[in-house]
Image (cartoon, grey):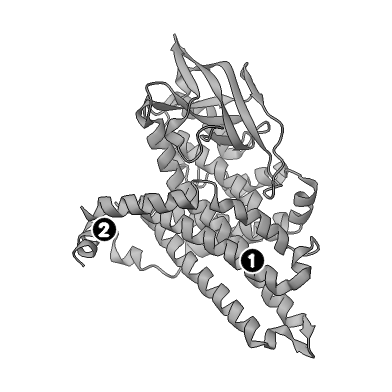
Amino acid sequence: MAVVLRYEQRSTLTEAVAMQFELNTDQRAIQEAAARFTAEAITPHAARWDEEHHYPKDVVQAAAALGFGAIYVSEASGGIGLGRLEAALIMEAMAYGCPSTSAFISIHNMAAWMIDAYGGLAVKDRYLPALVSMDQIASYCLTEPGAGSDAAALKTRAIRDGDHFVVSGSKAFISGGGVNDLYVTMVRTGGEGPKGISCLVIEKDMPGVSFGAQERKMGWRSQPTAQVNFDGVRVPVDNLVGSEGQGFAIAMAGLDGGRLNIGACSLGGAQRALDEALAYTRQRVQFGKAIADFQATQFKLADMVTDLAAARALLYQAAVKVTEGAPDKTMFAAMAKRFATDAGMSIVDRGLQLFGGYGYLQDFPMERLFRDLRVHQILEGTNEIMRMITARELYRLSN
């Protein structure tokens, strides 16, 4: 009990914000705008994009007209300056149509925010206008072939040479690899460990940048994914985001928001699975009646909607905490990511089961949702890492 009391005393979030379970008028308008865009531009085409491994760049860029290319980039830099809850609402709405495409837009937003939040005037003026409009699209490069969950062990090296850094190394599993224009990249400018890491913006066409073959993936087929290689790439010092040695802190701050977004993408996919299952069970007749009339079906649907509501409540609370800079924001972001992505995967799995054999066919969206949501338990930090972060922060906050 003493630990709980000390933890509660540390929370600076106002009671009114912490207890917000209803969206306000502006938030509902944002949610509805994203839902309309999804219904018109994403949902009707998502199955084809998946089947053809098609990257819908035109649709991704069309999202920028609604401000969705710079959701939490400041208004001073041309963005729409929204909070993390509003961003989650947008990602959730778009993921209802296609989790893969929504997640791709999320990654661009994270990269643009890093430049806006930490970059100097030169790097912001050079890149943000095109990122806000999505005339240029950005990738985020942290993971390496030998540094996945242990991100602080990254080996990509940037050596100072006059007014440039010379960058050599490789990044793995990069969304937009080989296609996107800019790569917000974590590199080692100093010694071993997190304090030796810095952040650079690297352009696709800089000499020495190359890409591996497109990865053959279980899901997320509407977005390109490839290894990014740097072979003596000369990057201007002005492309440094933040100061030397600040890169790991920037990466972790970005991941607080990225984890919320990927959790929101799971919510959107899970809501779609629930809606599809409700519709299917009403019209599917077995043993002389709709399977919706069987108690076993009703119990499964009841558990699905309960888990979805719980995950959504936790994620929305975490989003407010990240926006407010609450002391426990990192713990809540990790908890919400773990819980929402696990719940999302479980909801889709149970929805697919209600479809029976038809759920396994590409004629219905369930198998695509299953494949797309599975990776959410791995990226932005695996759910095992989320548990580690949660426990670490719990001990820190209880001291």
Query: Residue placed farthest to the top in the image?
Result: 162
Q: Are marks 1 and 2 in contact (CB under 8 Å)?
A: no
User: Could you tell me which residue is drawn at 26 percent across and 50 percent down?
Assistant: 396
| Closer to us: 190 or 251 | 190
Question: Measured from the top left, where is residue 81 in percent x and y?
Answer: 46, 47
Q: Is residue 133 above or below residue 304?
A: above
x, y (%) of residue 281?
A: 71, 79
Residue 195 in which image quadrant? top left
Residue 391 is left or right of residue 144, and the answer is: left
Tell whether 268 sits left or right of 278. Answer: left
Residue position marked by numbered label 2 in the rendering: 11
Residue 236 position in % (x across, y down): 50, 17
Q: Nearer the viewer, residue 132 or 177?
A: 177
The reply to whether residue 29 is in sight is no
Determine whether the residue tagged by mark 2 lies in a helix, strand or loop.
loop
Indicate the amino acid at tag 1: Asp
Whole-number angstrom distance, CA of label 1 to CA of label 2: 36 Å
Residue corresponding to mark 1: 349
Q: Which amino acid is tagged 2?
A: Ser
Q: Please tell me which residue is depicted at 67% across the width and 59% down the height of the picture.
A: 369
Q: Quadrant of residue 298?
A: bottom right
